[in-house]
Amino acid sequence: MIWYADGSGWNGRRSRYAVVSSTEKYIFETKEEFTNNEMEYLGAIRAAELAIENSVIATDSALVVNQVSGKFKVRKEHLKKYHKKLKKLCEEKQLELIWVPRKENEAGKLLERIQGHWL
């Protein structure tokens, strides 16, 4: 199964992430000020938590994919806890984390459709 994840950081009113599979949709919204990268990680973590073993997590965040794969170092201190959690989930559940273009990210499409609306 493939799970799509996307996040949107603080826009002056809220931070959000979405997770979408062929059968489920989740949206999380908070009034806390998170960065885009934090929300990207949180979306991917939620997808990994929901996924069964050997699933695929697809995100349009090259940073998240490359940090978890080890191609990029995690330099920002506030991202290290998210990186550690996602990497552990991927290893434990044998999940594949892949990058997809924004236009192919179903979770990103969901966030765009609800843009401007409160949940």
Image (tube, rainbow, N blue to C red):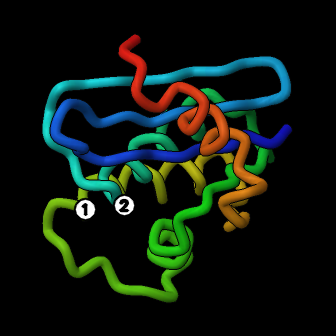
**x, y percent for residue 49:** 55, 32
**x, y percent for residue 98:** 70, 64
Q: Residue at x 71, y 50 (%)?
A: 105
* Vertical comparison of 13 with 97: above or below: above
Classify residue 116 as left or right of residue 99: left
Disc 2 element:
helix
Q: Residue at x 62, y 56 (%)?
A: 59
Residue with the most extreme top position: 119
Residue 94 in view of the camera: no
Q: Which mark is residue 55?
A: none
In the rendered image, which residue does mark 2 sit on?
83
- Mark 1 closeness class: few <14, some 14–19, many ≥20 residues within 10 Å: some
Classify residue 24 as left or right of residue 37: right
Mark 1: amino acid: Leu
* Vertical comparison of 68 with 9: above or below: below
Q: Quadrant of residue 17?
A: top left
Classify residue 34 as left or right of residue 62: left
Q: Which mark is residue 79?
A: 1
- Out of 31 and 52, give the one closest to the viewer: 31
Are the two marked residues, 1 and 2, in contact with CB atoms closer than 8 angstroms?
yes
Q: Residue at x 33, y 55 (%)?
A: 36
